[in-house]
Amino acid sequence: MTQQEYENMELLRFTTAGSVDDGKSTLIGRLLYDSKSIFEDQYETIKKTSERRGEEGVNLALLTDGLKSEREQGITIDVAYRYFSTPKRKFIIADTPGHIQYTRNMVTGASTANVALILIDARNGVMEQTRRHAIIASLLQIPHVVVCVNKMDLVEYKEEAYEAIKDEFSNWASKLDVKDVHFIPISALNGDNVVDKSENMPWYGGTTLLYYLENVHIGSDHNLIDVRFPVQHVIRPYNDEFHDYRGYSGRVAGGVMKKGDKVTILPSGFTSTISKIDTYDGELEQAHAPMSVTVLLEDDIDISRGDMIVRENNQPEVSQDVEIMVSWFNERPLQLRGKYTLMHTTKECRCIIKDIQYKLDINTLHRNLEDKDVKMNDIARVTLRTTKPLFADSYRRNRITGSVILIDEGTNETVGAGMII
Amino acid sequence: MNYQLNHLRELESESIFVLREVAAQFENPVLMFSGGKDSILMSYLAMKAFYPAKVPFPLLHVDTGHNFPETIEFRDNWVKKIGAKLIVGSVQEAIDKGMVVEEKGVNASRNGLQTAVLLDELEKGKFDAAMGGARRDEEKARAKERFFSHRDEFGQWDPKNQRPELWNIFNGKKHFGEHFRIFPISNWTEMDVWMYLAMEKVELPNLYFAHERDVFDRDGILLANTDYIEKKPNEKIVKKMVRCRTIGDMTCTGVWESQATTIEDIITEVSTTRVTERGGRADDKRSETSMEDRKIKGYF
């Protein structure tokens, strides 16, 4: 591979969710195997294990086997990250369990994904689990959803079976907030339409799954409109060469920042102009999400971690009262009037849960106004009051400036993840 | 105007974000430096992250005393180049003091002893965050590791009770006496590391490039000839053109027959190789879950 080729590769993150039976592990194994991302020693190990267990052929699902405890129980408990690449793209798979008791893991995997891969067993059609995965993809605002109707070999590769499922899913998903849905009939076990086009389904004129993953347009997945630069760390070299250097480093969370831009600093409200966008590799004329850069300003203003640099005429909501959809992660239920540490971009403060409005049924989208007991894996709409104002956008507009995590003040555990409404 | 970064720049940006987050959230972080390409990459990214200021944390090398001499030479030049402070923890000293006991037998390795010395150094230096160059693609237990990995006061990893990590918000909160292991290059694969080092023209230890060396075959793995390894009677020393794919202890790092003398050759070789880089690590071959077991005890 030449330097020019790998310098043109892009990164795509996708999430999968599923249970033991729907063929998720087989599909991932198939993608890894057919894209030649499996090494001989890995293949030999699973071949031996398959033989020892008396299985027919090599069980590709074993490639995604994880921790000892998971192998003993035959399930995926946690999020496992897997990697493969083609000459066009590098892929990061966040592989998560699909059962309702692991909703929090699915939410975690979905939080950074460009694409959600949803599997449907062609024999069973749209099940509760399918709906749950789609709802999570919608809540977490995954930009693209690809629905794989799997096990087509078990319905004799019939077009009607595929079309019926496609219609059923489309009708139901119309009430979700997913913009880009794509369908592909596959057999993960036999490899139909995964990497190579199937000869068993001549009626299907679309692309294979890998072709879709290699070509889906992800250039607009980041917000490129609203300039948001959460200050992460202040760089002061304290040496002769850079005596007066004061740079604000961070990762652009939205928009395109340019040298010479008039900016406002939150929370102080002071204004200045970007004098330099600096990196180790030299000065840049502009920077966009998700670049990590160091910004210098013309004026000497007191700025520290947790502050945010924005454009004068395009500012986030500055408020201490925040409405969020919270996904609860902890065995100890969410406490009404409870106090938690809150992290939002690079800012940290405390918050109190002022109100629990409703609990969302993750299988049906039904809003439960009576039962407000928010336990592990529940998703609920709550109102917070924070000790310091947040500089927030709605999660729909920006996944970085629209997200928060809640931390238990006693145990320091991350207990909840919130999406600002 | 194209606003899409290539995959190497996106990985770079993510790792720089994590490194800066460590400097911001912890009082006394340290970067684990082994002399291998992953820790070279990590410290190179740290230099970028804080430019033009100096890297705001020291590098810690746990020297087993069984390192390739080339590793030590490279290490000393590298820290000067990136302008960082170096701390060396010595396994030999720990053995001499009776803190740990050396393994015996033909497959004896000081790999396991590193953990005790590492934990001791972390305690001595009162470090609250130790950054490691582990990658999730290396091994199945590492596939589930977090960027910010919480450790109790014994340095242990509890795989079933890890903190969820969402978006790019990292929770580094801890109780007194606890610390964090941090893995800034979690999402890089072996191939990504090579491509990036080639793109950036980063200097590397010559062990990675093909050279002639005395080696012998043990259970299908080629090991460099050294006094540190007790040879079995049937193990014959031969001269071969070899290179390292990973750099660890001489006692457990396999070398590979190779003609790759440039980084471009290595990229070609890696892209056609059908065996994982840890396939040559004797320490991983002890049992199916050896990495998971070692990590639980505090290994990286």
Image (spheres, rainbow, N blue to C red):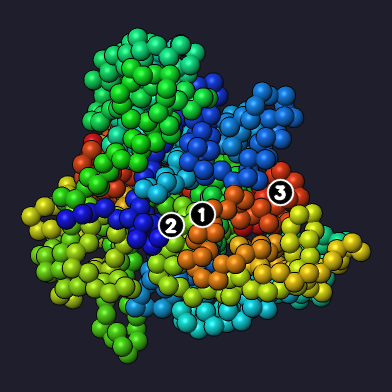
Please give the residue where the numbered disc 1 appears in the rendered image.
B271
As shown in the figure, which amino acid type bears the numbered disc 2? Answer: Met
Q: Position of residue A376 (x, y in %)?
A: 47, 30
- Asked if marks 3 and 1 fall on the same chain, the answer is yes
**What residue lies at 71% left-to-right and 35% top-to-bottom?**
A48
Position of B221 with respect to A398 (left or right) is right
Per the model, the C-alpha gap separating discs 3 and 1 is 27 Å
Please give the residue where the numbered disc 3 appears in the rendered image.
B290
Q: Is residue A419 above or below residue B67?
A: above
Dot 2 crowding, Cα within 10 Å, few <14, some 14–19, many 20+: few
Q: Disc number at residue A1?
A: 2
Q: Position of residue A153 (x, y in %)?
A: 48, 16
- As helix, strand or loop, the secondary structure at mark 3 comes to helix
Q: Nearer the viewer, mark 2 or mark 3?
A: 2
Quadrant of the rendered structure where residue A184 is? Answer: top left
Which chain letter goes with mark 1? B
Q: Are marks 1 and 2 in contact (CB under 8 Å)?
A: yes
As shown in the figure, which amino acid type bears the numbered disc 3? Answer: Ser
Q: Quadrant of the C terminus of chain B?
A: bottom right
- Asked if marks 1 and 2 fall on the same chain, the answer is no
Q: Is residue A276 above or below residue A81?
A: below
Q: Nearer the viewer, residue A411 or A227?
A: A227
Dot 3 crowding, Cα within 10 Å, few <14, some 14–19, many 20+: few
- As helix, strand or loop, the secondary structure at mark 1 comes to helix
As shown in the figure, which amino acid type bears the numbered disc 1? Answer: Ser
**What residue lies at 65% left-to-right and 57% top-to-bottom?**
B299
